[in-house]
Amino acid sequence: MSETHPLTTTAFELSGYRVVKSFGVVRGIIVRSRSIIGNWGASIQAVFGGNISLYTELCERTREDAFNQMLTHAGQLGANAVIGVRYDATEIAAGITEVLCYGTAVFVEPAQ
């Protein structure tokens, strides 16, 4: 599966396709923290209020990496789509967060 795959959805079916085979749950897990310098820069941004772009960029990159790991896992199983995609995050320690992206790997064909 390519790393930017159009056949992913939070729904449990893809419009215009039918599920031929299910491979089960696939996931991508990333654990990240911001560096001391990154935290210092974010603290400066927090003083002025608004979007803290350093943290926004870290979160977006982390979610994207977890998503891509999930797609890789699905591709290794022979899937060409992932349905029921979800994200979860857990703070493991102060400043260290795990992001999990998971879904059901399936093989789909165009509906006739």
Image: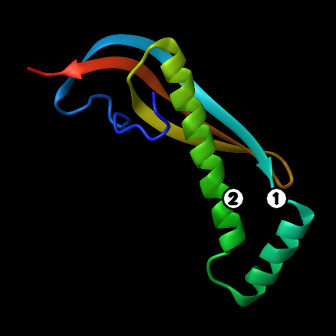
Q: Residue visible at 62% across and 77% down?
A: 51
Up-down: is 36 above or below 96? below
Percent position (x, y) of residue 5?
40, 37
Q: Is residue 15 left or right of residue 47?
A: left
Above or below for 63 versus 76: below
> Residue 105 location, x and y as percent?
44, 21
On the image, the x and y values in percent for residue 8 come to: 38, 35
Q: Quadrant of residue 9?
A: top left
Image disc number at residue 9: none
Amino acid type, mark 1: Arg
Q: Which residue is tagged 2?
A: 58
Number of other residues with Cα within 10 Å of mark 1, as a class: few under 14, some 14 to 19, many 20 or more: some
Contact, mark 2 vs mark 1 (Cβ under 8 Å): yes
> Would residue 3 appear left or right of 22 to someone viewing this image?
right
Which numbered circle lies on residue 34? 1
The amino acid at mark 2 is: Leu
SS for dot 2: helix
Whichever of labels 2 and 1 marks the residue nearer the N terminus, that label is 1
